[in-house]
Amino acid sequence: MSLLKQLLIIISALFLMIFSVNFAISVNNIRSYLQGEAEIHAQDTATSLGLSLSPYMHNEADPVILTMMNAIFDMGYYKEIKLVNVTGKSLVTLSNAKIFTEVPAWFVEYLPMQTTTASSEISSGWSMAGAIYVTPNPGYAYLKLYAQAKRSFYYSLITFVFANVLLFLVLRFTLLPLKKIEKMALRISEGQFELIERLPWTTEVSNVTKSMNIMSGKIAASIKRLNAKLDIVGAKLKLDDLTGLHKKSGFNTEMKRLFVRHIEAYIFMIKVDGLTSLVKERGSDEIDLLLKDFAQLLTDTSDSDEVGIYRFYGAEFVVLLQGATVDHARELAQKLSAAFSVLGEKYSKPDIAHIGVTPFNPVVMTEDMLFAANEAYEKAQIIGANSYFIGAAEDKAKGIAEWKALVFSVVDNRQYTASFVNSMQSLQSNQIVMQDVFTLVSDDQGNAVAVGTFISIAEKFAKIVELDKGVIEQVLEHIKAGQIQYAIAISLSTRTIKNSDFRLWLAQLLTDNQDLASQLVFSFSAYAVEKQVDIFQEFIEFVHKLNAKSMIKRFEYHSLSIEIAKQLKPDYIRLARDVGQGITGNKSQQVFVATIQEIGELLDIDILAENVVAEQDFNTLKAMRLSGASR
């Protein structure tokens, strides 16, 4: 029950009690007054009537006596007027037994009024001639009392209702700041650290508001400080220490984006030749300078938003050219080749580097494309000094057509199986808290199909929605059949979450399986979320309303900012494999994960690690209080 209702009920009850007591006292006082007034009036009537009848009592049969008594009886509210002589004989008796139907019987019963008879002696000369007795009729008093009680009741009721309405408005206005404080607390829990500018005038509420503002400000400052720290550490981890170029992990992330975007691209494999012999000839310091100059040359020559430059290790570099034709790739290769010749003269090495180029193929895995680029590099070495070789594109149209036929056949006939892998265990209790669902696909000959390529083609040709539906249904069947108590993470594609029919289907499915909805964790890759934040935010809010959960996976240094994660408010963030690998010996990684964990605690997000192999790394993450990790 809200504080407003509690105060309203308590104060109204007090008002009602005061009103009831006051009303009862008021009615009782009026009754006493009317009763006393009737007694006085009866006595006055008896006295005046006795004096008026005194001259006529010498003749008890005198008609004037009856006339005078009738005149008094008819004009007054009397129940009975009785005249007796000196011997007690009744001479005249006038009575009125009138009943007032306007007064309810229960009113008369609960408020009895005592009627007393007033009397007066009548003299005739110096001797007693008789006595007169006057009894008032209480019906008239009840009539006045009932009318007065009704009037008092209605006036009091109107006053009571008006007072309660006024009380409600006053309390509503007084407690309105508490609503703002409540909303503020909820916004803080959601990661939105707002301040209440206008302080309430109530001292106690104003003090609470000031405290909430201070807390919100401190948490916001803490989050800002942690974000800045995270940006610094993340930038350091994702860039090569010597050259400042992105590492291989950045290339892998960009390749994942390419599989989603379906655009033309070319991969340049570039290696500085004979680096080992150069180290012996010139020393490590001069070689470091050479690699820095080489990286700067790649940056200057490939200065474009569509070009990514990466240093894998040693003297091996990769340039990723996106949204380009083969002519653009050839033009860039020629520029680089010419620049290598100039750099070679500086270091007295005419033949300093070679370039192998291969086109991006959406039906081939990243490692296979790197292998093809390396083969092109070896051919470039044969051609001549600082030369390049562009590998011919395979018949992608034929390959995609074959994949399309396979995808349609598998999805339409449901020739896929949900496998449950990557058990995530709690770092506190060692119990399994989550598993991933992995889709196993085979061709007509029963051979395993590369799932990454299969998913990419399914999304390209809009079969991914039907596939995701089937996987979700298999997950629910698995939970029911095995009486699974932990959560199951289900990866959904961007096309699926944008599909309105899928949302209607999912809402009905989770409504029919409300007891299992909380065990479904819909997961999305950080690199996919970054491209369409609003879409994913809307979907996460949608599944939360259905009591399901959400997770951002493959979270790493360059995939997604923590500000976006705060905006999305997922239930889980799972770090990429590279983040947890070798963390024990890497202070920068430890700072990065510790910062993420601290932000997760502030925003109520569970932080998980993936594929932690080494025992010491597992213990290090456990000491950082992460929620869980897979091994």
Image (cartoon, rainbow, N blue to C red):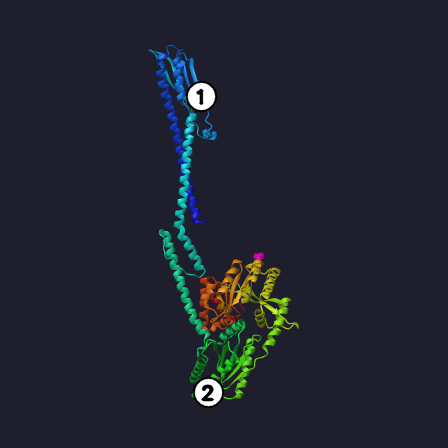
Q: Is residue 431 visible?
A: no
Could you tell whether 256 is left or right of 184 in the image?
Answer: right
- The residue wearing badge 2 is 341
Q: What kind of residue is marked 2? A: Ser
Q: In the displayed orientation, state which residue is furthest to the top.
A: 59
**Residue 455: which quarter of the image?**
bottom right
Q: Relative to 439, does residue 385 appear above or below in the rendering?
A: below
Residue at 56% across, 82% down:
392
- The percent coordinates of residue 332 (x first, y second) are 48, 82
Q: Is residue 513 magenta?
A: yes
Q: Is residue 155 magenta?
A: no
Nearest to viewer (mark 2 / mark 1)? 1
For marks 2 and 1, the one nearer the N-term is: 1
Report the front residue among 115 and 360: 360
- The residue wearing badge 1 is 96
Q: In the displayed orientation, state which residue is furthest to the right.
A: 445
* Location of the C terminus (image quadrant): bottom right
**Residue 21: which quarter of the image?**
top left
Q: Relative to 302, does residue 515 appear above or below in the rendering?
A: above
Give the dominant element type of the magenta stretch: helix, strand or loop: helix
**Which region shows up in magenta?**
511-515
Query: Would you call the spot at circle 1 few (<14 residues within 10 Å), some (14-19), or many (20 or more)?
Result: some
Residue at 45% across, 59% down:
189
- Element type at mark 2: helix
Residue at 44% across, 28% down:
112
Q: What kind of residue is marked 1? A: Asn
Distance from disc 2 to disc 1, alpha carbons, whole Å, reads 138 Å
